Amino acid sequence: MARPTLAQLDLDALVHNVGVVQRLAPGRKIMAVIKANAYGHGAITVARALHNRVDALAVASIEEALELRRAGVEAPILLLEGVFAAIELLAAAEQDLWLTVENEMHVAWLEQARLPKPVGCWLKVNTGMNRLGVTPDQAPAFFARLQACDNVADGTVLSTHFACADDLDSPMTRNQLDALGALDIDAPRSAANSAGILAWPDSHLDWVRPGYMLYGNSPMLLPHANADALKPVMSLKASIISLREVAAGETVGYGATWTASRDSRIATLCIGYGDGYPRQMPAGAPVLIRGQRAPLAGRVSMDMVTVDVTDVADAQIGDEVILWGDDLPLSEVAAAADSNGYELLTRMPSRTPRVHG
Ligand SMILES: *Cc1c(COP(=O)(O)O)cnc(C)c1O
């Protein structure tokens, strides 16, 4: 029998969350962002589940895109950082990948290449993130060069990326949208990530680019009604493998950092930081046992954690424990570890089996 430690994936929830995107941004094209192994869920699994439900996919690198092509995924795939060397253009053209174009070298490479067919391009405009993209002033000239280039397919999209869309009080998003809107270029446009889709309706434009929300999580800093309909795709699960009584005054775990303030019942779970549960998770952080929250007691080990189940009636060896998922939102768990859900998901190691029904 296998170690009962796993990331259970609910692919119906994934499809449901695409429906939430469609409801919030009706009629807009959807590019599902599945970089970093689909935020740890498994890029091939997720791409297959999204087949014919979204208009395109997006990944960070050509390696991620080619892995999907080898698995038979046929949807258009955008490389969010473009190519890293001119030599990648040939494979991109052959495999129908779309390119982010965001600097002079990207355009020069396209102008000089000999390609079997034109590639789709997304011209990225820097409107305030200051990470990637040409300036709004440069954008018309870059766009004209792409239009004139035989290696570039018709229909270049203008895109930008938000720095603060998770924060409704920040003026940044409005400024970024205004900068994109001010461009006098006749092209389809894209700005909205998950936070834009959830909270900034006039950012939806022609294409939306959901990532985190597809997996059922809200990126918003504060609770937002539009996120209530999302369903978590991943539930991280383990089991109680040992139970013991610990007298008041005794300690639990490495470093003896946790001391029982009363006679306590301590459950040991078969999951640790080697399975993707963060080591910095503090004592007191919740896990879910028998539908009830119970607090971590002591440090997270590589393969185990210990939990105070004194107040969970009938907790038994073999009980399933949920570390995040249904009724225990990933974003809340991540905040307890001073991290965010994006990081926890993308750090999930291959050791933890992804299981779906
Ligand atoms: C990662 C990414 C997204 C998706 O962001 P979420 O916050 O996960 O929705 C969208 N656009 C670009 C350019 C990205 O890099």
Image (cartoon, rainbow, N blue to C red):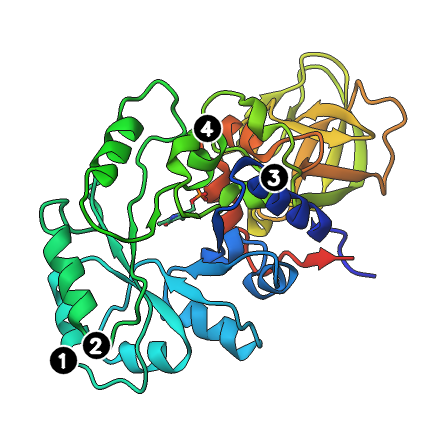
- Disc 2 beta carbon < 8 A from ligand 1? no
Residue on which disc 3 sits: 20
Tell me, yes or no, whether the two marked residues, 3 and 1, touch with CB atoms within 8 Å.
no
Cβ atoms at labels 2 and 1 below 8 Å apart:
yes
Q: Label 2, label 4: how many angstroms apart (C-alpha)?
A: 38 Å
Q: Nearer the viewer, mark 2 or mark 4?
A: 4
Which part of the image, by quadrant, shows the C terminus?
Answer: bottom right
Q: Are the residues at dot 3 and dot 2 in contact (C-beta closer than 8 Å)?
A: no
Q: Quadrant of residue 277?
A: top right
Q: Position of residue 236 (x, y in %)?
A: 67, 44
Residue 111, image quadrant: bottom left
Tell me the CA gap for discs 2 and 1: 9 Å
Relative side of 319 to 98, left or right: right
Please name the residue that numbered disc 2 is placed on: 86
Which numbered marker is on residue 199?
4
Q: Residues within 10 Å of mark 4 (few under 14, many from 20)?
A: many
Mark 2 neighbour density, 10 Å: few (under 14) some (14–19) many (20 or more): some
Q: Secondary structure at mark 3?
A: helix
User: Is residue 341 left or right of 96 when viewed as pictured?
Assistant: right
- The Cα atoms of the two marked residues, 4 and 3, are separated by 13 Å
> Mark 4 or mark 2, which is nearer the start of the sequence?
2
* Cα separation between marks 1 and 4: 42 Å
Q: Position of residue 175 (x, y in %)?
A: 24, 29
Tell me which amino acid carries mark 2: Ala
Q: Which residue is mark 1?
A: 112
Residue 274, placed above or below residue 341: below
User: Percent position (x, y) of residue 347?
Assistant: 49, 50
Question: What residue is at 87 percent from the left and 22 percent from the top?
Answer: 313
Query: Could you tell which of marks 1 and 4 lies nearer the N-terminus?
Result: 1
Q: Nearer the viewer, residue 14 or 135?
A: 135
The amino acid type, in three-letter code, at marker 1 is: Gln
Q: Is residue 153 left or right of residue 7?
A: left
